[in-house]
Image: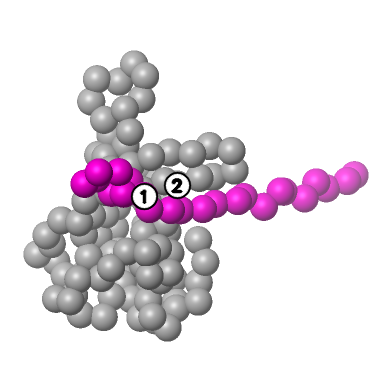
Amino acid sequence: MTTQTRKPITRTATIQTIGTVRVLWITRDKLTLAYRLETIASDLGGIAFQLEKAHQVGNDMPEVYHVLLNGHNTSCTCAGHSFRGKCKHTDALEALIRAGKIEVPARQVNPVCFECRKPYAECSCTI
């Protein structure tokens, strides 16, 4: 009996500004998805975002996800996060903050990485 080794999943996240709109691009292997990215207010602390998925053919309403990056209380309203406790949305946003691609508002108090619990500036985790 031979066992097949799974091919590692390649994931990337980038931010692009088109006019006044920030777009989050998440690529997993050959599939790339685009989301309108907005920073929103949070009464729970941390940094909150609204992600609006680019219009999909056949859907009248775009899918909208709310993401909160707040250490142990990190959350996303997507099904993946509800099922696994983590998702591509939180992973991508955390990676972009660590890389300095998303500015952390000054009023935020030292947000931490969901995985290692270190402040983003000290974190070395990858997507």
The amino acid beneath tag 2 is: Ile
Is any part of residue 1 visible from this angle? yes
Please, what secondary structure does the residue beneath circle 1 have?
strand
Residue 28: quadrant of the picture: top right
| Residue drawn where x is 88% and y is 46% of the image | 2
The amino acid beneath tag 1 is: Gln
Residue 13 drawn in magenta: yes
Please, what secondary structure does the residue beneath circle 2 have?
strand
Circle number at residue 16: 1
Q: Nearer the viewer, residue 113 or 96?
A: 96
Mark 1 or mark 2, whichever is nearer to me = 1
| Residue drawn where x is 28% and y is 68% of the image | 103
Q: How many angstroms separate mark 1 from mark 2 (CA)?
A: 11 Å
> In the figure, is residue 20 to the left or right of 93?
left
Q: Position of residue 37 (x, y in %)?
A: 27, 49
Is any part of residue 73 visible from this angle? no
> In the figure, is residue 126 to the left or right of 87?
right
Q: Position of residue 40 (x, y in %)?
A: 15, 56
Q: Which residue is mark 2?
A: 26
Residues in magenta, as a range: 1-23
| Residue drawn where x is 21% and y is 51% of the image | 38
Circle number at residue 39: none
